[in-house]
């Protein structure tokens, strides 16, 4: 996420990073981009735009598979109080 922060942040962000950017290199090197989505923490999900993330993955040449649905991503449950 840190390599693409300026591209996926909710309030800012350029959805189309240059292909030679660190963000695109990181996205291209990801073996399973869906796995990256599943690792976002609840806090990160409040800061980023998943639609921007999806656009960035496509712009960088390692887009999510057809019919991937970020709506299926649910933040982890908070820890139980003792």
Image (spheres, helix red, strand yellow):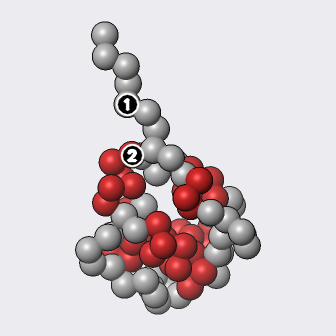
Q: Residue at x 67, y 65 (%)?
A: 68
Q: Nearer the viewer, residue 30 or 75?
A: 75
**Residue 63 on image: x %, y %:** 64, 75
Side (left or right) of 21 relative to 10: right
Q: Are marks 2 and 1 in contact (CB under 8 Å)?
A: yes
Q: Quadrant of the C terminus?
A: top left
Answer few, some or many: residues within 10 Å of disc 2's Cα (few below 14, many 20 plus, some between 14 and 19): some
Q: Is residue 82 above or below residue 7?
A: above
**Residue 77 on image: x %, y %:** 43, 33
Q: Nearer the viewer, residue 29 or 44?
A: 44
Q: Nearer the viewer, residue 12 or 20?
A: 12
What is the quadrant of residue 11 in the picture? Answer: bottom left
Disc 2/disc 1 C-alpha distance (Å): 9 Å
Q: Residue at x 27, y 78 (%)?
A: 12
Answer few, some or many: residues within 10 Å of disc 1's Cα (few below 14, many 20 plus, some between 14 and 19): few
Q: Check the image and name the residue furthest to the right.
A: 66
First of labels 2, 1 by sequence position: 2
**Residue 38 on image: x %, y %:** 56, 50
Asked if one can make out residue 1 in the rendered structure from this viewpoint, the answer is yes
Q: Helix, strand, or loop for circle 2?
A: helix
Residue ID for mark 2: 42
Residue ID for mark 1: 78
């Amino acid at each position: 996420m840190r390599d693409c922060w300026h591209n996926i942040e909710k309030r800012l962000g350029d959805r189309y990073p240059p292909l030679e950017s660190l963000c695109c290199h990181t996205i291209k090197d990801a073996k399973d981009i869906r796995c990256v989505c599943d690792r976002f923490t609840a806090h990160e999900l409040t800061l980023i735009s998943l639609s921007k993330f999806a656009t960035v993955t496509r712009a960088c040449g390692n887009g999510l598979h057809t019919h991937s649905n970020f709506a299926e991503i649910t933040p982890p449950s908070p820890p139980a109080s003792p």
